[in-house]
Image: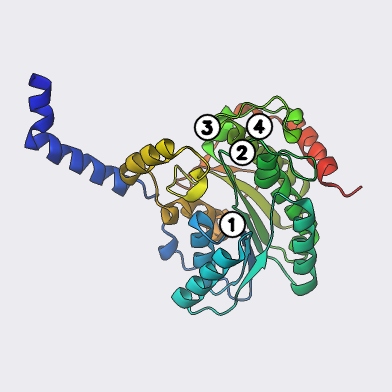
Amino acid sequence: MAWLDILYHPIWAVSTALLALVVRIQRRGNWDPQACTVQLKGKTTIVTGANTGIGKFIALDFARRGARVILACRSEPRGTAALEEIREKTGNSDVHLRLVDLSSLDSVREFAARILEEEKALHILVNNAGVSGLPRGITKDGLEVSFATNHLGPFLLTNLLLDLIKRSAPARIVNLSSVNHKKGHVDFSHFHGENLTYYMDKVYNHTKLHNVICTNELARRLEGTGVTANSVHPGIVMTEVLRHYPLIVRLIFNLIGFFFFKSAEEGAVSSIYCAVAEEMEGITGKYFDCDCSLTLPGPLARDAALAVKDFEVCERLTSKL
């Protein structure tokens, strides 16, 4: 009974509310995008998964800075809604929608071909789109659907646009990963849906590890080109990434997240930092935490020999035979 008295005491309620307020304030990092005066007038940018969540706020920031912004989205209705919202909020009419399904290599090739035909430059590429909690599925390319969407699709897209990005240097590539990459493992049979455990975020964690590994190897290959490549952790963010999880999991996540997790706008900050901050000029092959601090990725992500092998495997899997 004594414990119930404590829980029902007004001081408990007040202290809980204060704690929640302090946590919400501390969710914001030291770098403020609105205080950054960098302009992107004359720059062309692409953001995948820009119709919602983190991606939409990244695109919104680029548009406010005057960039030509290409929203790379799978859903035309949702992409169009985001397009209209961003144009209205920023007054920037140079925002455009291009459709792509990152789980389909053919769709990625068609998207890239259109970009190469229409665009004369590409200064910033943000690979933001991702999924978690999908059931097992194999694409028509013979690839596990989460690996195709989260890693192999963005991998192919980046490589198809790489020459254009190089010609546009200085340029930046930003790949959204997750701190959960530290719980991932490398098993190349995963790419074909083998030896995987489909429970909560286990598959997602593996894909995010490949993101960091291949970003590091890409950065090594781009040395001296004026193009940088970095991976970021956006934080634990209230987005639609959990839409494939059971309802009870989503309810608990949303309840706790209201007090402790980042909003999509807050989750976009670390990616925007890597894409536009002046202090990021020339920095490449690094992993940044959600507060924009440089931090070490997991041990597997620091294995240079593994990175070379992983990159080569991904090149073979995405090559058009």
Q: Which of the two marks, 3 or 1, is nearer to us in this view?
A: 3
Mark-to-mark CA distance, 4 and 1: 27 Å
First reached walking from the N terminus: tag 4 or tag 1: 1
Q: Is mark 1 on a helix, strand or loop?
A: loop
Q: Do the residues labelled 1 and 2 touch (CB within 8 Å)?
A: no
**Residue depicted at 70% across the width and 49% down the height:** 103
Separation of disc 4 and disc 3 at Cα?
A: 26 Å
Query: Which class describes the residues within 10 Å of circle 3: few (<14), some (14-19), or many (20+)?
Result: some
291 vs 199, left or right, is left
Asked whether residue 215 appears in the rendered view, the answer is: no
Q: Which residue occupies the foreground of this view, 136 or 159?
A: 136
Residue 282 place in picture, x, y as percent: 64, 54
What residue is pinned by disc 3?
A: 200
Image height of 140 relative to 74, above or below = above
Amino acid type, callout 4: Arg
> Which residue is tagged 4?
302
| Label 4 vs 3, first from the N-terminus | 3
